[in-house]
Image: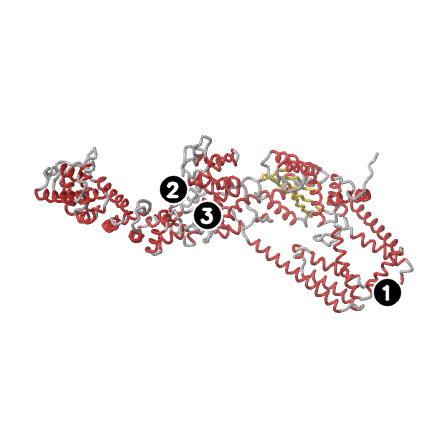
Amino acid sequence: MSQVKKLPITATRWLSLLLCAITASTITVFLSKVGFVQEFYASWGTILNANPILYYCSAFLAGIGIKLLLDKFYISHPKRSIGFNWRYPPVTIAVWLSVAALLVYLFVNTAYRPYFLDDDLLFSSLKYLHITLFSSALFVLFQETKEKAKKLGGKSWFILFAALVTLLLASGYYHTPWSLITTFILLYCFAVILRLFASSEIKQTHNESSSVEVNSGDDFNDLDDFREWFKDDSTIKSTEELEPDLQVYATRITERLQNGGDKDDKDDKDEKDLAQHIALCGPYGCGKSSIVESIVNDLAKNSEKESVWIHSDISTWGAASGSVAHVVLSNIIDGISQHIDMCAFRALPKHYTEALKSGGSVFQFASTLLAGPIDTDTRFQKLNDVLKTTNHKLLITLQDVDRGTGDENEKRLNDIAALLDRLKSRDLSHINFIVAMGNDKLEYTVVLSKVADHIETIVSQNFKRILSNWAKLCTKEIFNKNLKLINSSANDIDEYTKQNPHTFSQSSYQPAIISNNVIDSARMLKRVMRRVSKCWTRDKLLGEVDFGSLLLITTLREDNPALFNAFVNSYINLVYGKSLPVAKTEDGKQKTINETLSDLIADFTNSEATHVYNALFKELLNLKEDITDKSGNGLKSNKNSGEQHLGVKPDSIDYLKRVLLETVPKSELRDQVVIDSIKFSSTQELAQHICSDYGWQEAFDRFGRKLLLDDKNQNRVEKIAFDILEHIGKDKNGFLTEGVFEEYIKQTIDNGNLESVLNRLVNLESGEKLLELQLERLLRNFEGIIPIRDGNGSYIDIKDEADRREAASYSNELFQGINISNLLNSNGHKLSKRSFLICLKFKTFSQLADGEFIFLNKLIKNLLKVVINNKNTRVVDYLIKAITSDDIEIGHVELSPKEKEDILQTLVELRDNQENNSGIDMAIKNLSFSEEL
């Protein structure tokens, strides 16, 4: 049995529209004979004839109403061209056919023929029709999209304007008010001006966007280039503007869609006519949408030469699994409606059909008649035939199909796979699709294998070069704003890179290497860079935190918010060592930094990512060891470190808090303010700040070393040191015993200011320890050069005269020629025991050139002379402690009669003035003085 041959699409379409026209004409003629319709029209005409203005307004509103009605029923589309397609005419043709049929009926009917033969009767019947047409045209002008408006040239506007003015002038001849004609002309001009303005605005925007050159890698010359690149995540719509790696995918897919397959098959007509089913795979934000948009625009450029491509972009994010086919089909029909009349494919919306069904048996019956069964396979086949007839090709792009959670996402994926599998029929040669999705899960891979004939996988991009170059330019910004780089003495970026040639190398800059391993797409990279750039300004964090730490913590925040939050909550315990319940192990022991971080990583990441976050935290906190090694706390930096990463733990500054707030809290000193004050402000003002504010003391300890790095700053170092000694006061708990101020004092002493420093320190209670440390340093320097001790550590005599002279000279050089006798006589009672003995030793060292003598005897004699010259209880205590302890081995000291008399008299006077004189008696005995005393 032979199969019945179907009518071609064009014949079927024309036949259906002709039947619609005949039906509409018949119904209209039938209604015109009905009495109540005639009565209604007569009543309505009476109302309108009361005032001609009502007729004009009604005609104007009728035109707008007709256009809205056509749009509502999808008979017309705001974006559809007004061009006529003979192969698949729009449904509006049925309206014109029905009007033509009615006109024939009226002309044939003798009752209406006089209307055609009498001009007055004809124009009185139809003179308002052009007002309706004009209002429809005016509404279209306002409704046109900007993209379509820019395509209309001045010639098109002039022709349309001339046609409408002609109609208006003709209507003016038939008594249309000139005020109304003027109003219509002004409305038209206003619409044209708005459209032309929109057109020029789009052109200007297009020119501006096309002037922006998209670079990659280290082609960015400054931060403005970077900011222009990462300012937003807007989709790129041109293949030329894509990054070179992504251009390959766009070009290859475009060629496949145009040729029907690979280049080798382009001469095979059968292959060329086949539809393409392509999967574009890659992580979120890697550029899939930009590739799709570029492909669509490339296809549109070639539409004039070949078939016209229709693009239907569909996002299934959030769509219920049971309605995926309905959503996809509806979106496809909406997309094609912009080019071809789709009334034949338009079904009532699903939710509206359900509403009708709930209204009772009559509504259920109406719903069945209106909606009817939907066979997607049949509809797609018919749709393909329409596209083929009208020389169109459909490109369906499905995006966000892998977005969602739980079982609903898996069901939706399966529904999409089932739907797309139907589209893979060889008969659907004009329906192509591209599925853009990830392929990092097993179910995604299964879907791709079912629906796609060709799969393109976007390789992971390497962002190390971009990040390294960006880090260099951000560091350069510190110098450009006349700020200082904390960990360097360089004055500009060239000097800094010369001192550290491999700092910003993509093979050695750790923050870039680590961030590159975490960032999996250009979109995430831009998000990270935008967030960092937002706060990397002079009034926020520029020069106030370590840039590498800022980059790493921002990357962690964008990539793994859960791990980031856990790290923030544990930061105080990690860095400051606070005892928190969460930091306790099951046996009650405190967790180490390494153990805490290892647990955090294990809780919020998979095993494959452990090493990446391990490296991130190691660099972020400046850990000594690999954090998977549970050997203990391993922070490299203490609170006085001059660095700015998150591993530094000063008492008055919290660098994590700065990053979270994206600015320096008002309660904290800005690092750059402190550095600027140390380098340039009044030394008196700086000293006052340091001596009165702990925050300034801590900041000075951290950043004061920057002055020590340059010999040109020696004078300022000395002035700051003396001003601080002037303002420090009598606080014995002051900060002079440690930190950078000790280095300031050391440099000041080494520059020939020992005597001035000694005179100031001996009068400060808080300076006692610092003075002792400096004197011990001088003693170590002397004993490190001069062999004055034996293997047991006891002092020995130097036999060689030249060696004795050299030792004496070196001693005077270290003590800078100070008269130690005067120093001890005037200030000996203010010195600590250790400082007193060191000064006494240097007094003895300076006497080595006088001749050969026993060192210890000379030392004791010098001590006794100080006791005689400085009759002070504290000095005597030094004598007592010296001869009753192991500091100095006391033998029988040989004294002259006069010396014995003086020391004896001094000891007796002091003994008589003390209640407890056992110490002096012991001193007298050890010195072998007469026991009669």
Residue 594 image point, x, y percent:
44, 35
Which residue is at the front of the view, 830 or 142?
830
Disc with the residue nearer the chain's start (2 vs 1): 1
Q: Is residue 283 left or right of residue 594?
A: right
- Of discs 3 and 1, which sits in the foreground? 3
Disc with the residue nearer the chain's start (3 vs 1): 1
* Mark 2 secondary-structure assignment: loop
Residue 853 image point, x, y percent:
12, 39
Q: From this viewpoint, which residue is outermost toward the top?
A: 587
Residue 688 image point, x, y percent:
34, 54
Q: CA distance from mark 2 to mark 1?
A: 102 Å
Q: Can the viewer see residue 281 in this picture? A: yes
Q: From this viewpoint, which residue is outermost toward the right?
A: 110
Disc 3 marks a residue whose amino acid type is: Arg
Please name the residue that numbered disc 2 is placed on: 638
Please name the residue that numbered disc 1 is placed on: 121
Please name the residue that numbered disc 3 is placed on: 658
Q: Residues within 10 Å of mark 3 (few under 14, many from 20)?
A: some
Q: Is residue 468 left or right of residue 409?
A: left
